Image: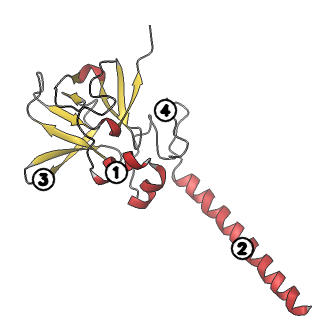
Amino acid sequence: MKNYNLKFSVLLLFQVFFLTAFSQFNKNKIKAVNVISTNDTIRKPNNPYYSNTSTKKLKLTDAEWKKVLPEDVYEVSRHADTERPFTGKYWNTDDKGTYYCAACGFKLFRSGAKFSSTCGWPSFFEQANSKSVVYKNDSSIGMERTEALCGRCGGHLGHLFDDGPPPTGKRYCMNSIALDFIPDPKK
């Protein structure tokens, strides 16, 4: 009977320790990622890093992104995958509104900068502001290109080319899957 009580006490102690530790972990985690604002238009309950209003830079591990992003968004955003041309939901739309990063919610483009490029992906001639998109050299397919990344989370969006319309002459060729869209309010 003593042996049974000892095992039961150890098991009970382990459970209390585990629940206390887990509780502390969750409290710390919530404090660390509390970037969502009540002003956010899009809410993604499974992604605590998503915010349409926060400008705080995100530095997450690949494993952390994998936990919070849908598989298709994860592959494009974190592994620079590309959706097939003419298949994305925004490649051929002209609705008025704002485009945001599908991984973190950062404001990227306004619809007034979108144009029909016939390349099969949504194209824009300018970003929403100077911090919306950042760049890096990409020679992954044997040619030099400029990769376009989200200015907040560093997620892959697409590529930047110098064959766009005036006034910039730029073409931000984006993956629809890397974008969320919020239409302008009806007047």
Q: Which residue is mark 1?
A: 75
User: In whole angstroms, how far apart are the C-alphas of marks 4 and 3?
Assistant: 35 Å
How packed mark 3 is, by other alpha carbons closer than 10 Å (few <14, some 14-19, many 20 or more), is few
Tell which of 83 and 42 is nearer to you: 83
The amino acid type, in three-letter code, at marker 4 is: Ile
User: In whole angstroms, how far apart are the C-alphas of marks 4 and 2?
Assistant: 37 Å
* Vertical position of residue 25 compared to residue 162: above or below: below
110 sits left or right of 65 in the view = left
The amino acid type, in three-letter code, at marker 1 is: Glu
User: In whole angstroms, how far apart are the C-alphas of marks 3 and 2?
Assistant: 52 Å
Sequence-wise first label, 3 or 2: 2
How packed mark 2 is, by other alpha carbons closer than 10 Å (few <14, some 14-19, many 20 or more), is few
The amino acid type, in three-letter code, at marker 2 is: Phe
SS label for mark 3:
loop
Sequence-wise first label, 4 or 3: 4
139 sits left or right of 90 in the view = left
Sequence-wise first label, 1 or 3: 1
Residue drawn at point x = 8 percent, y = 31 percent: 163
Q: In the image, which is nearer the foreground, mark 1 or mark 4?
A: 1
Query: Disc number at residue 187?
Result: none
Query: Disc number at residue 17?
Result: 2
Q: Which residue is mark 3?
A: 141
Sequence-wise first label, 2 or 1: 2
Looking at the picture, how far across and down is residue 47, in whole percent? Answer: 50, 46
The answer to whether any part of residue 57 appears in the image is: no
